[in-house]
Image (tube, helix red, strand yellow):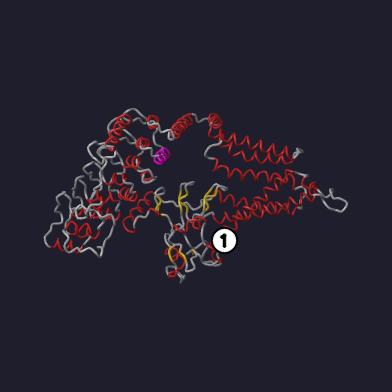
Amino acid sequence: MTHNHHHHSHNLFANVFLGGPIGSGTDDDSDGSPQHFPRRPVSVHEGGGDGNNKKGILKKDKQQLPPDIDASSMDIVKAVQYGALDRVMELVEGGFHVNERDAENVTLLHWAAINNRKEVVRYLVSKGADASAIGGDLQSTPLHWATRQGHLAMVVLLVSFGADPSILDGEGCNCLHLAAQFGHTALVAYLVCRGTVDINASDINGMTALMWSSYRISTNDPTRLLINLGASINLQDLKHRNTALHWAVYSRNSNAVSLLIKAGADLSIRNAVEDTPGDMARKLQIAWMLPQLTEAVKERIELQITRKNQTLFSRIAKRCSDQKQVRYWAMMLMPFLTYYVLGQTFDSDLNYLTKVLVILLFFGVIVIGQKYVFDERLQSILPISIYLATKFWLYATFVYFFVPVLHPVLTISFATLSAIHYYSFYRTWKSDPGYIKQSSEERRDTIITLAEHEGFDPSWFCSTCLIRKPLRSKHCSFCNKCVAKFDHHCPWVGNCVGLRNHRFFVIYLGSLFILAVLYLFCCGQYWAHQVKDLRDNKGHIPPGKALSINGWVIWAAINAFLHAIWVACLLVCQLYQVLWLAMTTNERMNCRRYQHFKRNLDGQITSPFYQGVTQNFLDFFEISLSRKWSKSPIDWMRVYSVEDMESQLFGGEGSHHTTTNNYLLV
């Protein structure tokens, strides 16, 4: 009763907002989805029946029979379902035809495919089984059945035997549509890259795989994968004239909405009832989604206006009036103003209570202004702006106050160290940290190779970059790229730290720590010069008088001291990880996720990359004591396993580590 009421109200809802009925209204198990949404073959095994019905579907992929099951008396269908190859061979050799159908119009190959019985499938095909036979209530092929279950290896096997993924089942869907509907990302990748089915192929109602994924799957993939593989994002279905973005809005799929907007989906396309995606969100009263759609429309309009007015004056005027640009510079310059106000307050002649009140008032203004001026980018902008502001004022202080009183050797030393520091900062900031790049053809070949030979494991396949991730790499959500030997994304330098800039990052930290300590020494030299006339009769300098000389310099010394503390902690942590643990920051935090990190007999996690502190140091800084190598011998862009690493290190002769057998998986 409740289900029927829900189903009826859903159809009424769909009539109003989508321009027609969505639910079929003919099935007891309909969920209100579009009429041709396929029902997956079910069975008494899945539904908790007696297990003897020949439509039983076993979810687990067991290529060998359980020891307590006797296959000698099984009929052919049950033998195929259980993967009893010997019994299947006995019955087929005894005269049973491999293409014979049961009472449900289902072939043996269907049952073998849905239960992932690969050896049985190979045998049946060798005996002439039709890999594209259509049968069952849904008029599906064995490939459709395997696709619904997400059996990648079975799909690959059937395609190799000539099964056609582009065949439409009884509800008008091909295998790509089914893979997208059920969220089988690996299957989507393989079917598209194999080239056996068009990525933009539509079902009987004009729905593409991207539309189905946007409508049915709330996670990023396979929607993101389909976009990256080149699916058309602005196609409209035949029945409701909805785009993928319409379907994402209708199903309240925030991930799909964000992905489609970022990919450039047309926000002005109207469906059968003349609704844009924004109109649909408004009618459906999806309040949390409306600002995102409205802002995207506004940005598109502003971009079009900018492109039409390309004069220098118009560009300057646009930047000055662009609210987003104003907000950006307000957030970027706020730390510069904060440092200056605090320094001037410390250096003023106001009493301490008044100084505290001024500081509190200033921060109160910032907190209030934050609600009206700052936006969601603050967390990414603030660290780098604080770094630049602090450096700017510290160097201004050094030049204005310290240089006139310092010995030239100190000034030259500080300038030389600063040059090293800013060079390493620039290399960390602007260098390619090790982005893994492949051509479109290489990406497709990789997907096919992984699916057909090594197996498709999403844990080391990046559906955004469409690459097999090398060992020690990770996809950075900030940079939206995979980085080889990924350490972390550093907001203080505005870049990832990885294979190609990690050593510069450590040099940057080391030089920054030495600079901070040297800066504090220079502060001491400045104070010593300023207070030499303040000594009392005993030759002592009263602390109160010393601290009252220059509040601005005191503020600079506080900043230098804080920098020295946190940079020292970070530097020690980095050196400990690199030299003693042979791990990156990402690996140390997530070592339990990676199978190549093992526990030794003492329970300690051990890295397979450890080669001794000295060799770790030489490899990390790419220092060669031999003319044979001009750089690190391991190409982390091409290492996909520990065996690959050992092959590069030892020329294929195997690892020198002899304790591997004593390790347990983490």
Q: Does the image show residue 206? A: no
Q: Is residue 246 above or below residue 580?
A: above
> Which residue lies at the image location 53% right of the left edge and 29% below the top edge?
314
Residues packed near mark 1 inside 10 Å, few (<14), some (14 to 19) or many (20 plus): some
Residue 486: percent from left, percent from top: 49, 54
Residue 334 within the segment the image draws in magenta: no
**Residue 218 quadrant:** top left
* Circle 1 SS class: helix
368 displayed left or right of 70: right
Along the viewing direction, whichever of 55 and 179 lies nearer the viewer: 55
100 lies left or right of 213 = left
> Horizontal placement of 413 versus 318: left or right?
right
Q: Which residues, given as a range, are shown in magenta?
A: 254-261
Q: Give yes or no for residue 257 being in the magenta stretch.
A: yes
Location of the N terminus by quadrant is top left
Q: Residue at coordinates 25% horizontally, 43% vertically from top-left?
A: 38
Say which amino acid is labelled 1. Tyr
Figure quadrant of residue 370: top right
Query: Which x, y percent locates residue 151?
Result: 29, 53
Classify residue 334 as left or right of residue 15. right
Image quarter of residue 239: top left
Q: Residue at x 64, y 50 (%)?
A: 563
Residue 600 in the image: x percent, y percent? 47, 67
**Residue marked by disc 1:** 576
Q: Quadrant of the C terminus?
A: bottom left
Seen from this angle, which residue lies furthest right? 537
Q: Is residue 278 above or below residue 147?
A: above
Which one is nearer the viewer's eye here, 585 or 446? 585
